[in-house]
Amino acid sequence: QVQLVESGGGLVQPGGSLRLSCVASGFSFAHWAMDWYRQAPGKGRELVGTINSRGRVTKYADSVKDRFTISRDNTKNTVYLQMNSLKLEDTAVYYCAWPIGSEVHWGQGTQVTVSS
């Protein structure tokens, strides 16, 4: 059974940082690219970024480029999202995702709230 469990969300002031984690189980994690998405209130789900299976290639949405960093530790079946210089508009539920063909497996999400 595939499971993706995110953690690390919370309340942070503008300009602050958070690191999200996503622990995967039920599939060969080291063989697959992984994604991070987010969904802000009243908006659709947005792709934040992606990392390839070995962690050597990452791509980011323009809205987070140079502020967010995705990394992974295949020995721990974990993918991370380091978020720096957070802005009010980064407030959202953040999801890690395992895309496999036309199917996507989702975690339950973790809330990130940026507020002063």
Image: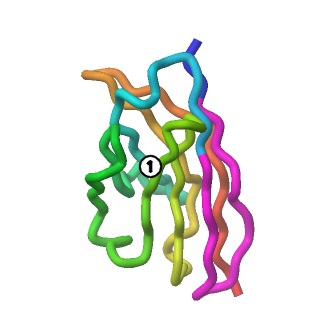
Relative height, residue 74 to residue 51 (above, below) = above
Quarter assignment of residue 5: top right
Residue at numbered disc 1: 36
Q: In front here: 50 or 55?
A: 55
Residue 63 vs 49, above or below: the answer is below
For the point 38% across and 53% down, which residue is it? 46
Q: Nearer the viewer, residue 23 or 10?
A: 23
| Vertical placement of residue 52 versus 102, above or below | below
Which amino acid, by three-letter code, is at mark 1?
Trp
Q: Is residue 6 shown left or right of residue 75?
A: right
Q: Secondary structure at mark 1?
A: strand
Is residue 8 found left or right of 68 in the rendered image?
right
**Residue drawn at point x = 49 percent, y = 18 percent:** 27
Residue occupying the point 48% across, 48% down = 72
Residue 15 within the magenta-colored segment of the rendering: yes
> Which image quadrant is residue 69 in?
bottom left
